[in-house]
Amino acid sequence: MLRIPFPDLYQALLKAMLALGIPQERAQRCAQLFAETTRDGVYTHGLNRFPRFSAMVENGSIDVHATPTLSAAFGAIERWDGHRGIGNLNGQDAMSRAIELARKNGIGAVALANTNHWMRGGAFGWQAADEGMFAICWSNTLANLPVWGAKTPALGNNPLVLAIPREGGHIVLDMAMSQFSYGSLSSYSKRDVPLPVPGGYDSEGNLTQDAKAIEASQRALPIGYWKGSGLALVLDAIAAMLSGGTATHQFSPDPLREAGQSQMFLVIDPSNLAAADELNHIADGIIASLAQATPIDPAKPVRYPGEQTLTLREENMRSGVPVDPEIWSRISAL
Amino acid sequence: MLRIPFPDLYQALLKAMLALGIPQERAQRCAQLFAETTRDGVYTHGLNRFPRFSAMVENGSIDVHATPTLSAAFGAIERWDGHRGIGNLNGQDAMSRAIELARKNGIGAVALANTNHWMRGGAFGWQAADEGMFAICWSNTLANLPVWGAKTPALGNNPLVLAIPREGGHIVLDMAMSQFSYGSLSSYSKRDVPLPVPGGYDSEGNLTQDAKAIEASQRALPIGYWKGSGLALVLDAIAAMLSGGTATHQFSPDPLREAGQSQMFLVIDPSNLAAADELNHIADGIIASLAQATPIDPAKPVRYPGEQTLTLREENMRSGVPVDPEIWSRISAL
């Protein structure tokens, strides 16, 4: 495994973003988000995602010059149009605006239509928590998950992020609606290793831990079977309705043309309801209570959502950020 | 199965509520909520729950005279104290207030501390949707679910409700964090029928569809394994922190003393962002798209969350509401 110092990763990504025609200030922000995603261990949506991002700029799915505009506003909620601009920049802008609305009104929301894949959803959770805010945000996606009771895709693998600010380390959950993403299934099937728990149905309709069988049937499982199926559906409906944008069933099935996502950004500013000490005390009590549970493997203490991010972040800043050698050599040669 | 006309069910519940010392107007609302819950097919949290509700009034866990009071407010978010009053009335009041806040500010939230079991969470989703509002609400509970990586309970089976208003039938998802509740496990184990999908671990740590083995190990599964575990944790933390109330780890392990829940009620009023026609059109498109998916069993079309509620509601209003004969004879004899 190749490890690259964070500043080198950022510089290479910045040059690559500029080569795609992204204006300077926006190229910097975009490179920063891609580099931080890799630094935090979300390798699928950082550097390794750049080739696909680049292809979607080149095929016109992403407009590098578009910036979001306000379409409607009332009180503490706003509707924005992302004009198919760069997804992680649109997401960051939408979250910034929702934070402003929450600061003024205690709670605020932005519904963003017509944007693009936001890359790592957790980034916007960390962004809010770093400002002392609670956040709930999600995106819809193209249809790649069967709805409960059906065997063909009708649901998006919609990512859902919940963030809680905490002095001792934010609690940030970043999860999608499938038990395993297709990227994860592919990694198990390449290594010929069974999934740790059932991840879908084979072509005969049996629950299976065989990733290859699920890749063949395309019947990956939503989390909690009928429950995650329902959750994926309502998240899609809320985002599409409130933003006035595209719903899962309206996306192109071609992942390189998956443009026009609808997203929700809900933010709560707790600072006028409670003192920071009270909030940290409650959060610390919850984290401490996890240590009272008996671990299955005494060598593996229970973790809270976001804990591993901080561990990986520190390790990768210290030892260099792991990169795929082939993608790295292509990008650093630009 | 015994079926009782809805008005008779309501009247019997009203008499029972009055016998518990609940003041008239509140007894009417409470009986209405219990009766509607049974009418809508959520049998576990309607009439059948009355004996436990009654025991908790008698042991002092529920104070029938307490009503919620405002503890803190800023803009569109408020913190209320439920004073361990009746859970479904506190929930209805909190949702009413969140709806008022949303009507004024586009979005509104109430964080409710120190309340009691809200019975059927979906009731508050339907309440919001009937007013044309989107809602997200949840409650924490006592610890009855192992956190991922542990074999003893540390998480609540926190119910989460998402509601979407729609002229052709609201979309309302009402789900808890466990794949199967202990009530549901007990129903499978009594009938000696295997669970349809794995529902937990046996005492040797193997995934199992044997409800009895899970009742013995007390290792029920959160939905989506590590994902539902993370979701249960963050829902608890957000509700406890924002309400300033009890977190899951602080509850008595005795279900008859499970008092002091923390709850969140988030509401969005879409009416100033978009026309009702636009919203219904998007929602109808999503519901219609489900019919395009190929059903596993052609005789079982795919359903959306809330669809079965309307079907059961109509059937039970027409043919009478199904009740447990023993509980019914006890209550109607009061």
Image (spheres, coloured by chain):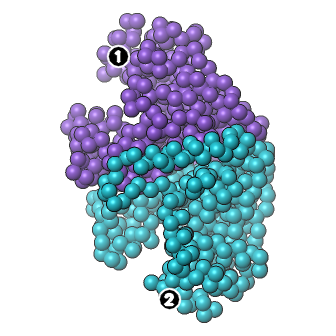
Chain colours: A cyan, B purple
Q: Choose top left, top right, bottom left or bottom right for residue B321.
A: top left
Coordinates of residue B221 in the picture (x, y in percent): 35, 48
- Direction from residue B68 to residue B155 in the image, left or right: left
**Furthest-bottom residue in view?**
A333
Disc 1 residue crowd, few under 14, some 14–19, many 20+, Cα 10 Å = some
The numbered dot on residue A77 is: none
| Pair 2/1: label in front | 2
Q: Chain of mark 1?
A: B
Where does the C terminus of chain A fall, quadrant-wise? bottom right
Q: CA distance from mark 2 to mark 1?
A: 69 Å
Q: Answer whether labels 2 and 1 touch (C-beta < 8 Å).
A: no
Which residue sits at x=44%, y=56%?
Answer: A303
Q: Choose top left, top right, bottom left or bottom right for residue B106.
A: top right
Residue B206 visible from this viewpoint: yes
Q: Amino acid at mark 1?
A: Ile
Q: Mark 2 sits on what residue?
A: A326
Determine whether B195 is above or below B260 in the image. Answer: below
The numbered dot on residue B327 is: 1
Coordinates of residue A254 in the picture (x, y in percent): 53, 73
Coordinates of residue B210 in the picture (x, y in percent): 23, 44
Report whether mark 2 lies on the same chain as mark 1: no
Describe the element under mark 2 as helix, strand or loop: helix
Which residue sits at x=75%, y=56%?
Answer: A97
Viewer-nearest residue: B33 or B39: B33
Q: Amino acid at mark 2?
A: Glu
Q: How many marks?
A: 2
Disc 2 residue crowd, few under 14, some 14–19, many 20+, Cα 10 Å = few
